[in-house]
Amino acid sequence: MLIFRILSKFVPKNNFYSIMFKKILPIFMVCAIALCMASCLEDDEQEIIYYEDTAVTSFSLGNLNKYVTVKSSTGEDSIVKLTTDCSSYGFRIDNMSRPCMIYNPDSLPLGIDPSKVLCTVNTKNSGVAVWKYTDANGQDSLAFYSAQDSVDLSEPRELRVYNTMLTAYRAYTVTLNVHKEVADSFVWKSFGADATLSSLKAMRSVCAGGSVYLFGFDGASTRLYMGDVASFAGFGQTDVVLGADAYSNVAMLDGEVYVLDGTELKTVTEGVVSVISGNADISRLVGAGGTRLYAYDANGLMVSSIDGGSTWKACGMDAPASLLPVDNINMVALKSKTNDDTYQVMMVGNGTETSKTSIWSKVEEAPGAVEDQPWSIFSLGEDNRCLLPALAALHVIPYNNGALAIGGKALDGSPSKPFSHFYASRDGGLTWHADSTYTLPEDFSSVSDCFTMAVDSNNFIWLVCGGTGQVWRGRLNALGWATDDKKIIAE
């Protein structure tokens, strides 16, 4: 009516147009109202769409029960139930395999109860999720999924997602991975004692190409012993006989074992010796980084080779060569987490001042880099209270994204027990800490100055003990767990 009054002001009074306007406008208003009502009725209608396809789009966990064993004040074991939030564990959904798979690449902690699992399942196009069950009589049945109802995932279980037309479904095998061992536990396996090895005076070992190479000094010459990593049944003595000092001139680069035998630089592959240079221009082979061999030249200076020892180039050094290590020299290369073909290389050994270790470090870039970074010595001043002690038969290996060291008696005169600690470094060799995560086997027995340690590609540490001939293999549990990129080797 308000619109009618406004429009009537523009129509002349008391004439034909005014009369017609008053008759037609009400009819127009009724039609407009009817159209508006029809439009409103159409907006209230909902169209239901049925889809032929569907899939699981996400799968996640909630709070799960975890059972842990604790000791009481009297020393008795008891089991305690805790609640653990597992929502941060991601799940992979593989729609390409047949059947499709849902699984967690990062296993849940030890002690999680997989028999009562609360999970959240989201589907595409409002698909209907159901669990498949098998009763005691072997009959299959289905139960609708509910986020409030727990499901038993102790064994892989089938999850089906039906489309909204209920004409087809997609089946998934849901697997819940739970750790069965403690992550930071170290497990050793004994391979007994080898009488042949017990008589050796000094040893060095490396792992390459699926084999453990043991170079042992018998008092007159260096002998080579080998064992298979995957199916180890003891060390077998080869026909290889090298000079007396060859055991201390061993390096491994790109799966190739190098040894300096007097003036000859050689490679040893599965017991076969090949000569690279009959008159190598080096006096000591000290190790390998990620892309280079390193040695001392005739003047005791650091040199490197990028062509397998055929040619050598002087390295930069920020301290006098007299401070370089002279005994029990170890070299560890840790791959950079940020740059390809870049390594943090450390050289660790006992220096001319036998009561102290000599530790050097450098950044090793690809052979084509514009500038070759120099070697730098780490200060052994009093301001650094986390030093690696000078130890007899010192061995250092790369392990668990850092360096791990152990040795015999202390060379500074302290009364510490030989092989009493593993020392770990996480900062490229700058600081070292006795790490209780790593412990030697209970029956471990070795003379202080004859011992060797090496690590293989599956993170197994190999120990060979002088005087007893004991052979041990061990690994940190967490480094043996399977991932998408690494296959586990069962102990």
Image: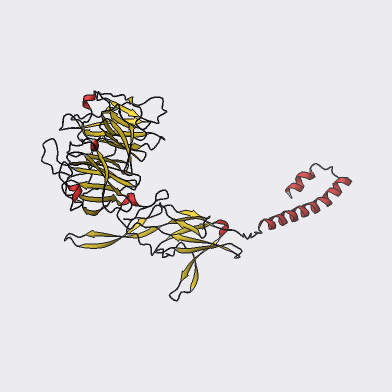
Extreme residue in the right direction: 16
The quarter of the picture where residue 342 lies is top left
Q: Coloured how? A: secondary structure
- Does residue 406 appear anywhere in the picture? no
The image position of residue 349, as x and y in percent, is: 22, 34
The image position of residue 225, as x and y in percent, is: 26, 45
Residue depicted at x 81% and y 54%: 27
The image position of residue 379, as x and y in percent, is: 23, 28
Say if 179 sits above or below 403 in the image.
below
- Does residue 413 appear anywhere in the picture? yes
Q: Which of 135 and 46 lies nearest the eye of the viewer?
A: 135
Residue depicted at x 80% and y 41%: 10
Q: Is residue 206 left or right of residue 73?
A: right
Q: Which of 121 and 176 lies nearest the eye of the viewer?
A: 176
The image position of residue 79, as x and y in percent, is: 26, 62
Say if 318 sits above or below 422 in the image.
above
Q: Which of 214 and 277 lies nearest the eye of the viewer?
A: 277
Extreme residue in the front direction: 239
